Image (spheres, helix red, strand yellow):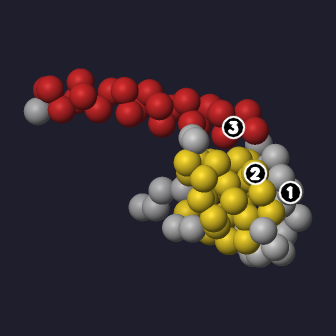
Amino acid sequence: MCLAIPARLIEMLDAEQAVVDLGGIRKQVSIALVPGAVVGDYVIVHVGHAIGRIDPEEARRTLALFGELAGATPALEARA
C-alpha cells in the first residue's frame, strides 16, 4: 500500500520542479509526471513526485478526512 497526499501547487521552479503546500508545509516536488500542471492545481504527491492532478473539491474532502483521522488517533490509542 502507498500513501499519496493532495497538495496545492504554489510555485513553478522549472518545467519539472515545483513547490507545493502540504497543509502549511512547503515542499519541492517533481512534476515531470504531470505535464500541464499550473500554479493553483491540486496534485497527488507520493515520495516527492506529483503523480496526477486531483479535483479541488476531492482534495479538500481527502484532506478533511486526514484531519479527522489525526484527531481520532489519541482516542484509538486510549483504547489499546
Task: Indicate whether 80 appears above or below 6.
Answer: above
In the rendered image, the quadrant that contains the N terminus is bottom left
Residue 7 seen: no
* Amino acid type indicated by mark 1: Val
User: Which one is in front in this view, the residue at disc 3 or the one at disc 1?
Assistant: 1
Closer-to-camera residue (14/61)? 14
Q: Position of residue 77 (x, y in %)?
A: 18, 32
Q: Residue at x 57, y 68 (%)?
A: 48
Residue 49 seen: yes
* Amino acid type indicated by mark 2: Ile
Q: Residue at x 62, y 32 (%)?
A: 61
Q: Give the quarter of the image for residue 70.
A: top left
Label 1 belongs to which residue? Answer: 38
Q: Secondary structure at mark 3?
A: helix
Q: Are marks 2 and 3 in contact (CB under 8 Å)?
A: no
Label 2 belongs to which residue? Answer: 10
Q: Residues within 10 Å of mark 2 (few under 14, many from 20)?
A: some
Q: Is residue 6 left or right of residue 69?
A: right
Q: Position of residue 10 (x, y in %)?
A: 75, 51
Q: Position of residue 73 (x, y in %)?
A: 29, 32
Q: Give the quarter of the image for residue 57.
A: top right
Q: Is residue 11 left or right of residue 45?
A: right
Q: How far apart are the alpha carbons under marks 1 and 2? A: 8 Å
Q: Earlier in the sequence, mark 3 or mark 1?
A: 1
Q: Secondary structure at mark 1?
A: loop
Label 3 belongs to which residue? Answer: 58
Q: How far apart are the alpha carbons under marks 2 and 3? A: 18 Å
Q: Earlier in the sequence, mark 2 or mark 3?
A: 2
Q: Earlier in the sequence, mark 1 or mark 2?
A: 2
Closer-to-camera residue (24/65)? 24
Q: Secondary structure at mark 2?
A: strand
Q: Which mark is residue 51?
A: none
